[in-house]
Image (cartoon, rainbow, N blue to C red):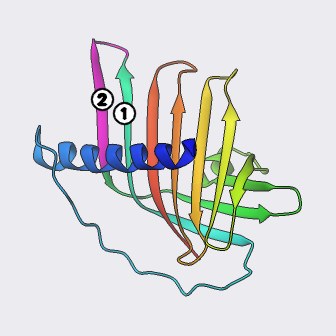
Amino acid sequence: MWYKTAAVIAAVVVVFLLGFSYRGDAPAKVSIPFSSNLVNQGQTEFACDSVAGAFLSKDLSSDAVEVGSGAGTDRLALKFDSSKKTVTFLTRAAVEAGIAEGDKFQIIDENDTSVVAIGGSGTAGSNSILIFDKKTNQAVWSKASNALIMLGEVMYLNCR
């Protein structure tokens, strides 16, 4: 399915950007340790920490692309509603900006081990994909946008 390909591409981008950021021009593998969480089966609301993240965007002042990566600092909340087939996605940055309600992602695939959801609006220029592992409470979130400038972002999340 297309979203599995998107997840692989997101993972490759993270590895490349982490390597680029830490070693100059040469891609490399970098390990960022973190503590796994106790998994509570049936849990539907999670607080998540970004373990690692990467971004790329067009530099508006030149003909260049800016890239960055490293240990994560972002936090967000996820709320799964299987009956409505949605995941509510709320970042700390949104809360700090006064936004009280998160974005709704549409669940496009769910089984015993994972949930895949997409969010955003193609017409507004931003799309996201969230792949959540139910067995580990870990997830990958990636976002691509061309609203004002072309940009991409990916985070590896550890949820509790």
Q: Quadrant of residue 135?
A: bottom right
Neighbours of disc 1 within 10 Å: few (<14), some (14-19), many (20+): some
Provide the residue span drawn in magenta. Answer: 60-69
For the residue pair 57 and 116, the one nearer the viewer reads as: 116
Q: Residue furthest right?
A: 83
Residue carrying label 1: 56
Q: Residue furthest front?
A: 1
- Callout 1: helix, strand or loop? strand
Neighbours of disc 2 within 10 Å: few (<14), some (14-19), many (20+): few
Q: Residue at x 59, y 41 (%)?
A: 128
Q: Is residue 9 left or right of residue 22?
A: right
Q: Is residue 88 left or right of residue 133?
A: right
Q: Is residue 145 left or right of residue 101?
A: left
Q: Is residue 66 left or right of residue 142?
A: left
Q: Residue at x 45, y 29 (%)?
A: 151
Q: Are marks 2 and 1 in contact (CB under 8 Å)?
A: yes
Estimate the spatial distance between the alpha carbons at disc 2 and disc 1, rounded to whole Å.
5 Å
**Label 2 vs 1, first from the N-terminus:** 1
Residue 27 higher or lower than 39, as above or below? above
Residue 8 higher or lower than 112, as above or below? above
Residue carrying label 2: 66
Residue 17 part of the magenta segment: no
Tell me where residue 21 appears, x and y as whole percent.
Answer: 21, 44
Most frequent secondary structure within the magenta stretch:
strand
Tell me where residue 63 appears, x and y as whole percent.
Answer: 27, 12
Q: Residue at x 32, y 13 (%)?
A: 61
